[in-house]
Amino acid sequence: MLKTFTNFFREEEGQGISEYAAVLAFVSLLIITVFHFTQGGLATAISQSHSSIVNQIDRLNNATANANPT
């Protein structure tokens, strides 16, 4: 039983998971900080970019449908 606990604390497999969690937490805090300091400007830019991409895809789909009527 003591050997099991000793092996548990010596293994480093869980170390990778905790490092990923720490990086994820750091990136999350960084994103929250950026959104906070841009006061919605970044969210607006992302929304406009998304809308532009969707509109371009719609135009391509319509052009393709009109060019190849079946």
Image: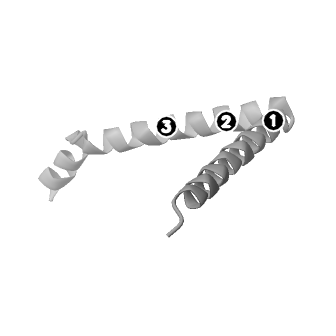
Q: CA distance from mark 1 to mark 2?
A: 9 Å
Q: Give yes or no for contact between labels 3 and 2 (Cβ–Cβ under 8 Å).
A: no
How far, Cα to Cα, is label 3 from label 1? 21 Å
Is 16 positioned to the left or the right of 31 in the image? left
Q: Residue at the spot x=47%, y=42% of the render?
A: 21
Whole-Å distance between the Cαs marked 3 and 2? 14 Å
Dot 1 alpha-carbon crowd within 10 angstroms: few under 14, some 14 to 19, many 20 or more: few
Residue 44 image label: none
Q: Residue at x 66, y 51 (%)?
A: 59
Q: Which of 46/10 is in front?
A: 46
Instruction: Work out whether residue 53 or residue 44 is closer to the camera in this orientation and state it.
Output: 53
Could you tell me the amino acid type at mark 2?
A: Ile
Q: Secondary structure at mark 3?
A: helix
Q: Quadrant of residue 12?
A: top left
Element type where label 1 sits in the image: helix
N-terminal label among 1 and 2: 2
Residue 10 location, x and y as percent?
21, 40
Percent x, y for residue 36? 81, 35
Residue 31: numbered disc: 2
Residue 42 percent across, percent down from the top left: 78, 34
For badge 1, the amino acid type reads His
Identify the residue under disc 3: 22
Q: Which is more toward the observer, 5 or 65?
A: 65
Measured as percent of width and height from the top left, residue 57 is found at: 62, 50
The outermost residue toward the right is 39
Q: Which mark is residue 36?
A: 1
Quadrant of the drawing holding the N terminus: bottom left
